[in-house]
Each structure stands twice: as structure tokens, then as C-alpha cells.
Amino acid sequence: MKFDVVQGDIAAQSADALVNAAGTSLRMGSGVAGALRRGAGEQLNEAAMEKGPVELGEVAVTDAYDLDADYVIHAAAMPHYGDGEATAASIRNATRNTLEEADDLGCRSLVIPALGCGVAGFDLADGAEIIAGEIREYDPDTLEDVRVIAYSDEEYDTLRAATDTAERSGMAEESEADR
């Protein structure tokens, strides 16, 4: 599946679903969660916490409230704040579960941040390669517009480079399989 890397504030994006980079408690703190909470209103945090806690790598869905989306998918790529860091497996599982949930909801468009990176402690470039690989390998039912979002110029450059690396790697694997 193809996707784009975009730059901006996730809370200002328009899509069927926006993805929150959540901890297992689903309490919405800072970063992506804080931006979504500010854009949607405090009721988003309340709704998310009612759905939690969830297991590492799992997702929960809430209304998007005042955001330009139908849903917020809360993807728990990291343990509750202060209880550890994200892992390659938690990022992989959270990404895959997010894509599956979006399809189950009938979403055509999705905006996803670099799950498990930043405050969650996982290296951004490595995390982006994992996320890009999961998106690329996913066979969607309804999803057709997936955007990986970066906030800063530096984050955008890192995501773009890492996803380009993952794309080249995927093309090499497909080429080898054709032989």
C-alpha cells in the first residue's frame, strides 16, 4: 500500500481517522496526544480514558469531537508514561492494529504519527522504517489515503528518509521474489 509523508499539526488534518500516539493508559498528555486533545476538546481525553487501559500494541477508538475526522484511533505503542519505552514489536503491532481498525471502521483516509518515537524513547528513523514497512505490506479493504505526519522540519526530513529507505527495501524484496 502506498502512503505519503506530510508535515503539519495532526489536529489540523482532515481524514476519516486521526491516530493518537498513546500509552497503554490512554491518558492524553503532551505531544501528539496534547495536540489532539486541544483540537478536539477535553471530552476526547475523557472518552479515551474510559476505554483504557489497553494492552501494549492494542488500539481503542473514540469520537473525534471537534477535529475534522470521524474517529480518533488511540494506538498504544508505548507503556503507560514512566513505565518503560516503546519497542519494535509494540510499534509494529500498534501500526498493524491501527490499519486493521481503520479498515473495520470503513475509513478511506488515515493520518498516523510516528508511533512510539519521541517521548516514547524509540529512535525516530528506526520507528519510521517499521511503520512504513507495516503500511507498505498492508492489504487494505477500504483505506486508500494514508499519511504519515511529522510536526517539525527535522522530523519530516527523518521520516521522509526512513520511509524512502523502507520503500527501496520493499522494492528490492519484490524484485527478488519475481526472479
Image (cartoon, helix red, strand yellow):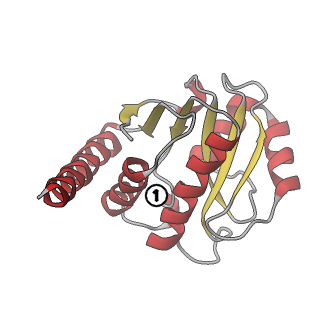
Looking at the picture, how far across and down is residue 83, in whole percent? 64, 77
The residue nearer to you, when weighing 173 against 114, is 173
Looking at the picture, how far across and down is residue 28, in whole percent? 71, 51
The residue nearer to you, when weighing 94 against 149, is 94
Tell me if 53 is positioned left or right of 121 in this view. Answer: right
Tell me if 157 is positioned left or right of 96 in this view. Answer: left
Report the residue marked by disc 1: 118
Residue at x 71% of width, y 70% of height: 55
Tell me if 156 is positioned left or right of 60 in this view. Answer: left
Residue at x 58% of width, y 22% of height: 14
Tell me if 118 is positioned left or right of 174 in this view. Answer: right
Residue 37 lies in what quarter of the image?
top right
In the image, farthest residue toward the left: 179
> In which quadrant of the rendered image does the N terminus lie?
top left
Q: Tag 1's secondary structure?
A: helix
Looking at the picture, how far across and down is residue 77, in whole percent? 57, 63
Looking at the picture, how far across and down is residue 96, in whole percent? 53, 56
**Relative height, residue 174 to residue 146 (above, below):** below
In the image, farthest residue toward the bottom: 84
In the image, farthest residue toward the front: 179
Residue at x 38% of width, y 38% of height: 152
Whether residue 42 can be seen here = yes
Q: How many marks?
A: 1
